[in-house]
Amino acid sequence: MIENAKRPLVFVAHPDDEILGCGVLLQRVPAALVVFAVDGAPAGFGFERKFGSLENYSVARFREAGRALGLAGNCSFLRLRARAGAYFPDRHLFEHLQEAAESLLRIASEFSPDAIITHAFEGGHIDHDACSVLAHHTAKRLSLNGFEFPLYWRSETGQDVIQRFRDPHAEEITLNPSEREIAIKNKMLSEYGSQQDLLAVFSPMQERFRQFRFCDHARPAWTLSYSGNWRDRRDARIALRRYSEFSEAFSTM
């Protein structure tokens, strides 16, 4: 059970994902490490104009993360790095699975967590799904308990579904926060000033988790098609191929 986790590694794609999915849990555990997968600064959305450069935008987001996680009082964070030392670019984690896996394994081995917690594989964001692939791999390699949480995905009718699992037949664990925990979580979220418009659709009232089960990342039961332009649809097809290649390489190790 996730309530038994005392030293979890929370592996998420972007700054703010950790608070949305685990902001209450992070307040309850004696120690935790958050690991961010990508630089949080996607190209093509105008952030370079608002912040002067994409690098400035990334720096701003991780400063926000430091302030937000400081409110938990028992949590630190690290970032994945490629072999050459660079951070992985937002929306392109699926292109760097092997190097990202090496970085995550190294961090997890040094931290010695008793569980790893990450995004559910749900087709909402291409980096979230790549995190799921990497976390399942790490849990197997290190014999860790694994848990996942939902954030968002789009239904077949085009409706955005927020904080609910896409395939809810598996047993779920719900954390119901106290008023104090809600207040702290809201304060943590408020530190993410650059994301306030996006965060407004999420509720701090519940956090849902479930234990890892077998997931065929290369062949999901639903159509994987990230919302957006033709490039996002193309990347979904490429990502499935990369997940399959990564899985096959792992199975021979």
Image (spheres, grey):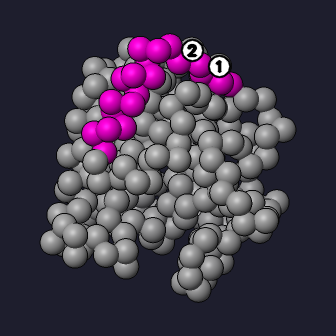
Which sits in the foreground, 34 or 252?
Answer: 34
Which sits in the foreground, 45 or 112?
Answer: 45
For the C terminus, the image quarter is bottom right
Q: Quadrant of residue 3?
A: top right
Q: Position of residue 177 (x, y in %)?
A: 53, 18
Task: Please name the amino acid that badge 1 sits on.
Answer: Met
Asked if marks 2 and 1 touch (Cβ < 8 Å), the reply is: yes
Our reading of the magenta stretch's main secondary structure is helix
Task: Please name the amino acid that badge 2 sits on.
Answer: Asn
* Number of residues whose C-alpha sits closer than 10 Å to that of mark 1, classed few (under 14), some (14–19) or many (20 or more): few
Return the mark for residue 1. Answer: 1
Vertical order, 43 against 169 (above or below): below
Q: Magenta stretch?
A: 173-192
For the N terminus, the image quarter is top right
Under tag 1, what secondary structure?
Answer: loop
Evaluate whether residue 170 shows in this view.
Answer: yes
Q: Position of residue 238 (x, y in %)?
A: 60, 78
Return the mark for residue 4. Answer: 2
Vertical order, 51 against 147 (above or below): below
Q: Residue at x 31, y 45 (%)?
A: 192
Q: CA distance from mark 2 to mark 1?
A: 6 Å
